[in-house]
Every structure is written in structure tokens, then in C-alpha cells.
Amino acid sequence: MKKTLLAAALLAGFAGAAQAQSNVTLYGLVDAGFSYAKLEGKQSVTGINSGLMGQSRWGIRGSEDIGGGLKAIFTLENGFEVDRGTEIGGRLFGRYAFVGLESAQAGRFIMGRTTNLGFMWAAGIANPFGLGFGQSTVSATFGYNDSELGGGRSDNAVYYYSPSFSGFQGAIGYSFNVNGTEAAGSKNNNRLIDLGLKYDNGPLKAVLTYQYMKPATGGNGNFKNLTIGANYDFGVVAVYAGYANAKNIQNAASWNANAVYAGGFSNTGATFTKDNAYTIGLSAPLGPGKAYAAYQKATQSKVKGFALGYTYDLSKRTNLYTYFSQNEVRDWAANKNLDARQFAVGLQHRF
């Protein structure tokens, strides 16, 4: 069934392009490399892994000019693992699946599945490693990818993004059930309000995002997540900083569960309901490539660590990369801290 849907999507995309009914583009990213990961007290894990610098993906996006400066738009994007050739998360288009309208004067309106604004806007501004580079990712401590928020993605959502005014852009989103199909009765769904404001003009980038989620179960109360970040490019070096505050965390055992900890790791036994996170970082041209460094810490979930990385462009679309990270994580069941290390070297190609 999945193969049939995939083939149908590809054929539809190429057919649309051939008939010139709309502007349809097939795009993607393929990323694989060698990774060594070791969690203190566990056996190391070594091998070829997918999506070390950035998750491997392919997608189809398109637009049609419908007059008056207005365009109909859509995006369908799939995540996959290069090392095994498998789909991620059991969804054909688990990364993006939306349709909408867009104009240069009025902004963009979409409906479907997309990323929340913390995941989309804040990560790359607050930290040079952004959402990639294994456990170096800033989402090892920041909470916009909490499981209650659908791992950073919003189902059943409507979002509006304003045009950019002198570098400023705002956005607002609402999900009728952030992860899964809507149930009868609005109180039986995890409803999300998502707000964001960013500035991108010249060497300065800054962002503020806020998620407010009302859980169906009541749980620990309404989940609130604030993220603030900025970076400034001085030319010889770019400086990054960010802060995040989460309140009424619903399930501490799954908090930041996407981090890469070899041999398996969870927060089983954790009972915290709030967290504060901080990050600082640098990026700079170095020789023929670019170097990265960052430190991050989350106070209540007791995660902290540093990362170093380097990328080298072989062309405009292909690059080599390497990174090393060491985090300290909390084994709540054993009531002790553990070292988690990861080293990787890989190749990424974008098309």
C-alpha cells in the first residue's frame, strides 16, 4: 500500500510539471555516516547511521498562480533512513503534509501537518547545531519537541505566517489535536496554540516562540513552552545564545526522548514538571570549511554538555561533516549522572 501511494505521488508530481498546470518540484536530502555512541555503563554502538547532520528526506512541493498575486501551495515530505531504506515513524508524509494559499502582500495560510514554530524557527537561531548533529542538537535540552507537542510537529493544524516587514515576521497556529486524529468533543483532544515572532535582517537574527497546549487528560495542567534565541554574525565569527522555559510538563519520562544515547536510555522515575534550558555557541569559517561549538544545559531534567563540529563543502549541494559531543544525562532510576558521548563523520547531499 505504501509503495502504491509513493508511486502515485511521484507520478502526480511529474504529471503536474509536464502539463504546466502548476510549478511542482521534487526535492530532498540524503545523509549517512559512521557513528560511534557510548553511554556510561552500556556497550557502545557503532555503525552506519542515517540523518546524522540532518534527517534524510524527500518531498514534493508546488504552487499555482491563481491570480491577483495569490498562489495555491502544497508540500508533502517524507522522512526515511538511508542505512536501512525504511520510512520513519510509519507515516508516508510524516514531516510535512499541507495545502494552503500564499501571497507576497498577505502572507501564507496552510492546513494540515507541519512543524511548530519553536521547532521551525528557534532551533537554528539559538544554537549553531540546530536540529541536527545527533545528540549535539539543541533539542536535547529545549522543549519544543516534547512528546505532548507531537515531537515538534502539529497534526490537524492551521497556521498563518505574515509577510516580512523590515526583517520582522510573525506567525500563529492552532491544532485541533496536535498528535493524531480528532476525537469527538474538543476536550478530548490535545489542543495547541502556537505563537512566534522572528527578526532576520543583516547580521542579526532573533526569535521568540510560545506554545500553549491544553491536554485532553488534564494531566499536570496546561503545558506552556517559551523559547528565546538570537545570533549575530561578525563575519569572522557568529555568536549564538538561547533560553527556554517549560511549565507543566506532562510526562517527564519522555522529556527530550529524541536525544541519542547509546545502549538505550530513558528518564524513567523522573517526576519534574518544569525545566529551564540555556545554550551558547559559535560558528566560524575555518580553512576550507566551517567550525561549530556549543554548550547547553537543562536544569531540572539535568542534561548538560558540549559539542564540536566541522563541515566542508564539496559543492553547493554536497558536504562532508564530522562532530563530537559529550552530554551528561540523569539516570533517575539509579539516581546518578551518566556520560553520553557520540562521534560521527558523514556525507550529506541535497537535491
Image (cartoon, helix red, strand yellow):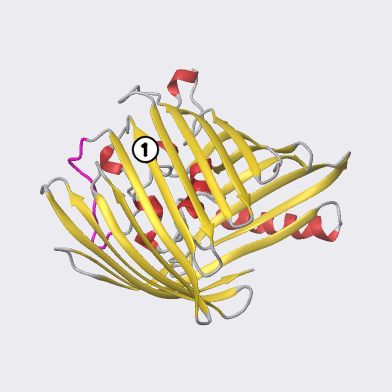
User: Relative to 308, is 301 above or below?
Assistant: above
**What's the magenta bit mostly, secondary-structure-wise?**
loop
Q: Residue placed at 31% from the left, 62% from the top?
A: 306
Q: Nearer the viewer, residue 173 or 125?
A: 125
Question: Where is residue 43 drawn, in percent x and y?
Answer: 19, 68
Q: Quadrant of the C terminus?
A: bottom right
Q: Residue placed at 56% from the left, 51% from the top?
A: 205
Q: Is label 1 in a helix, a strand or a loop?
A: strand
Write down the quadrant of residue 129 in the picture. Answer: bottom left
Question: Where is residue 222 drawn, in percent x and y?
Answer: 38, 25
Residue 330: say if magenta: no
Q: Which residues make up the magenta segment? A: 261-271
Residue 116 visible: no
Specify the amino acid type for callout 1. Answer: Asn
Q: Where is mark 1, residue-wise? A: 245
Q: Viewed as shown, does residue 132 lie left or right of 299?
A: right
User: Relative to 65, is 41 above or below?
Assistant: below
Question: Where is residue 55 drawn, in percent x and y?
Answer: 49, 61
Q: Viewed as shown, does residue 195 lie left or right of 41?
A: right
Q: Viewed as shown, does residue 326 lie left or right of 188?
A: left
Q: Viewed as shown, does residue 14 lie left or right of 236?
A: right
Residue 320 visible: yes
Question: Where is residue 57 drawn, in percent x and y?
Answer: 55, 60
User: Relative to 288, is 226 above or below?
Assistant: above
